[in-house]
Image (cartoon, rainbow, N blue to C red):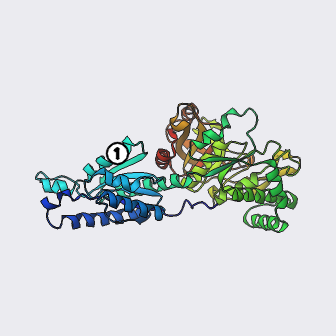
Amino acid sequence: MSRPSPDRPPRIGQLSVYFGLFDEAMPPEFRRDREALAHRFTEFLSAGGDVVYPGVVDSEEAGRRANRVFAAEEVEVVVFVPAMAAPPSYGWEAISGLDVPVISVAAQELTSIPDVYTTEEGTQRSTLVGLVMFTNVMAREGRPMVTLVGRLESAEFAAEVAETVRAAALANRLKGSRVGAIGAPIGGYLDVEATPDEVARLGLQMVSISREELNTAFAEASAEGVKGLADGLRDRFETSRTSDEILHRSARLALALQDICQRNGLAGGTVNCHGDMFRWNPEVGITACLGVTCLTEAGTPLSCTGDLPAGIALVIGKAVAGGSLYCEVYGVDFEGDWVLLANGGESDVSMADPTRPITLLPEDHYMGVGGPGTAIVFSLPTGPATLLSMSPIAGAEGGWALVVGEGEIIGSRHEAIEGPNGMFRFSSGPAPEAFQRFCNAGATHHSVLTPGHNLRTLQLMAEWMGFEVRAV
């Protein structure tokens, strides 16, 4: 089962309406003028993706034709951008039955309204009237929506619309995704649990992977594939402290996890190394840090300890920002006003500082019956970053909260921790108070670090995925 790449340009259905009621009262060129405006809208929207424009929708039948075009072209988001006021039934017919996000946009031609403004001019430039007619019906019918109002000639507004389109398309691509649980959570870890019904509220499907399936995939990984992966890792990273035996066993497990994810069509998920699936399984016998790292880098993020909510946050973060690091907040530096982020050796190497080495080490802190797995150690680059944590929360919209703290990585110097590490400073205020807000908002003890500032995109995605964003 293939999934659309998050980097692929969104397919945008342009929905521009026209109302012929005023034709007799308006100049002969009125319709041509509004059709020309709709073509300007096409150019405007093309900055955010590939536009599918079925022509102006000037009747309910035209709306049904547009609907068929949108369905056939597999648009990922519909942008309602009216050329003028028109009965909202036209637009409603165009989106009826389409299970895709809808964004309503008024791209106004005028920057200011002149003192002398005639009825004809008001009719010609009635996009705001058309907008609110349609958004009322969206609200009546309970359709999630985002509405944007701005100037057609504004580059900033075009960028805002493009960002919103991207967020909508990402939400649409994640809808229906399968997330895997390869091992149940550690006993007593109540803060990382999630049921299949809770996961389904996000429009996702939880898939539980058996120990037998893992053992079979581990046994069937080819010696050639194992050697090829291990050799490739030695070419890329510093591996002198990791023996062939350790690296090859970890590579075999990485290939097994890759096979499981591919055969089950998983977008991501979680493993629990600390149980009878991995460390104490005589068929496997090691931690899965290397496999988690390889899959997360390739676009199928996995968390550890059976923390599926963190796995879902990793999937969202990777789609939004291109990088997604599973981590914990290890402590507060009160003098420097930062918190230490690190983990036990699993990673997303796409987030590593490119100027510093990436090292593979035996994971001897978490030994299994088969010996150590392979841990990945690297430093994070300085720059803007966003810290996430996701959990089912009673009373949150949709039953889920995504806690979001924007900030920056200000340094990375804790290599002795033998895992990815960085010093994170919250943008919202002093580190102790910011972390208090992080806790009070419902964060778990597993966080996700993403590059860049991503709060706005996450807030937009939440409109269509049905979770609540709690900014701290």
- The answer to whether residue 348 shows anywhere in this view is yes
**Which residue position is annotated with label 1?**
137
| Residue 372 located left or right of residue 1 | right
- The answer to whether residue 357 shows anywhere in this view is no
**Which amino acid, by three-letter code, is at mark 1?**
Val
Give percent across and percent down for residue 116.
10, 53
Mark 1 secondary-structure assignment: helix
- Residue 244, located in which quarter of the rendered image? bottom right
Say which of 295 and 394 sits in front.
394
- Residue 93, located in which quarter of the rendered image? bottom left
Say which of 45 and 373 sits in front.
45
Q: Quick one: label 1, few (<14), some, or many (20+) residues within 10 Å?
A: some
Q: Which image quarter is the N terminus in?
A: bottom right
Give percent across and percent down for residue 74.
49, 62
Give percent across and percent down for residue 102.
41, 52
Say which of 327 and 389 sits in front.
389
- Residue 305, located in which quarter of the rendered image? top right
Residue ID at (78%, 57%): 256
Give percent across and percent down for residue 278.
81, 47
Residue ID at (49%, 56%): 169
Figure label count = 1
| Residue 43 located left or right of residue 318 | left
Residue ID at (40%, 47%): 146
| Residue 271 located left or right of residue 139 | right
